Image: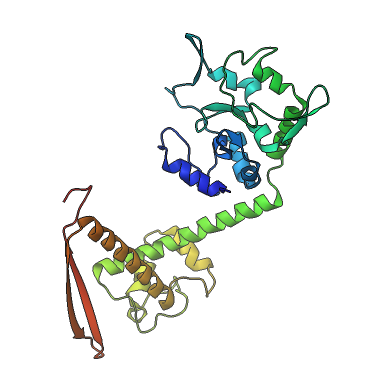
Amino acid sequence: MATIDSVASETSATSSEDDQPTALGQRSFTDVGLLYDNDQLRRQRVAQLSDDQKNSLLRQHWMPPGGYNWPFFQKSTQRVYLRPNQLSGRYGCLKLSNILSGVVCVPCALFATEYATNNRGKLTTLGTLVRTPLRHYRCLTGKDSSIGSHLSTNYHKTAQAFADNFIANRMTVASQLDNERRRQQVEQRARLVPIVKTVLQRGRMGIAFRGHRDDGSLDLQQPVSAAQGNFRSLLAFRVDAGDAALKEHLATAGKNATHISKTTQNELIRLCGDVIRDRIVDDVVKAKYFAVLCDETTDSSHQEQLCLCLRFVHCKNDKT
């Protein structure tokens, strides 16, 4: 069984950003067509949706941009086009899926049961606009139209009531916890940005990081002494130059979460080295031809060090 994330990645890989929305994990889910496979609604995929994804489908569904080629139904020699006004107003629950090239009732796709009782009291399987998309655009609106008949069914009214209640009460405990977790992630990443930039700047210039006395928190009320090292001096300079995010972080962070210790510095340097190495390897693979130079020497502590150098022609945009 395909998961929501795998289906979303496959869809985004085969479509451009201009003609189709993307769905990446929990961040975006704006086309109901991702719930379908071979024109059939997959209830397993509906069950995997988070509250935020359901909210996106109900309130922020993909809409055709200006100049969009609206789909049509071929009737003999005449084309019957789907029109924007057929998906607005009292028909606003119906959405055109760019993936399916058809119309789907989003509340029913999310909340309707697989079976419903018809006017005769018999249990039937839901069909067009729910289980399968609507692509027959003849007689869509009106008393006996396809859309009008759908909107008058009890299962649609029930699903629409569930959708309205969901939107009105979306801020459940779980949703609030998810929002708070995301807010904390964004905040923590913003705190790390100036620290990472400082590490990158020191590395580009080849300037030493450490000092003799550079442990503990950084007191912004006191001038930074030379013994505290270049790294802490530059952090203090950034704060003095107006870096509000870094100032807030250093003033409020716990002693075990300042991210400026020698351990964190070494970890950031290692991660930067991993990124640089991976990019060099990618460039070498693109170049195809390369040479390896190596030399061995001892450092100041008389430990043997092996240096490797790569020579290759850098290719940019498939050109040398």
Farthest residue in the bottom direction? 302
Examine the rendered structure and indicate whether residue 197 appears above or below residue 165: below
Horizontal and vertical percent position of residue 31: 54, 36
The answer to whether residue 180 is left or right of residue 212 is right
Examine the rendered structure and indicate whether residue 96 appears above or below residue 72: below
Horizontal and vertical percent position of residue 293: 16, 73
Examine the rendered structure and indicate whether residue 309 appears above or below residue 281: below
Q: How is the image coloured?
A: rainbow
User: Which of the pair 135/318 is nearer the observer?
Assistant: 135
Q: Which image quadrant is residue 56 in? A: top right
Residue 261 seen: no
- Residue at image point 21% right, 48% down: 318
- Residue at image point 51% right, 55% down: 186
Q: Which image quadrant is residue 13 in? A: top left
Q: Which image quadrant is residue 93 in? A: top right
Horizontal and vertical percent position of residue 110: 66, 37
Horizontal and vertical percent position of residue 167: 68, 38
- Residue at image point 26% right, 89% down: 303
- Residue at image point 32% right, 65% down: 200
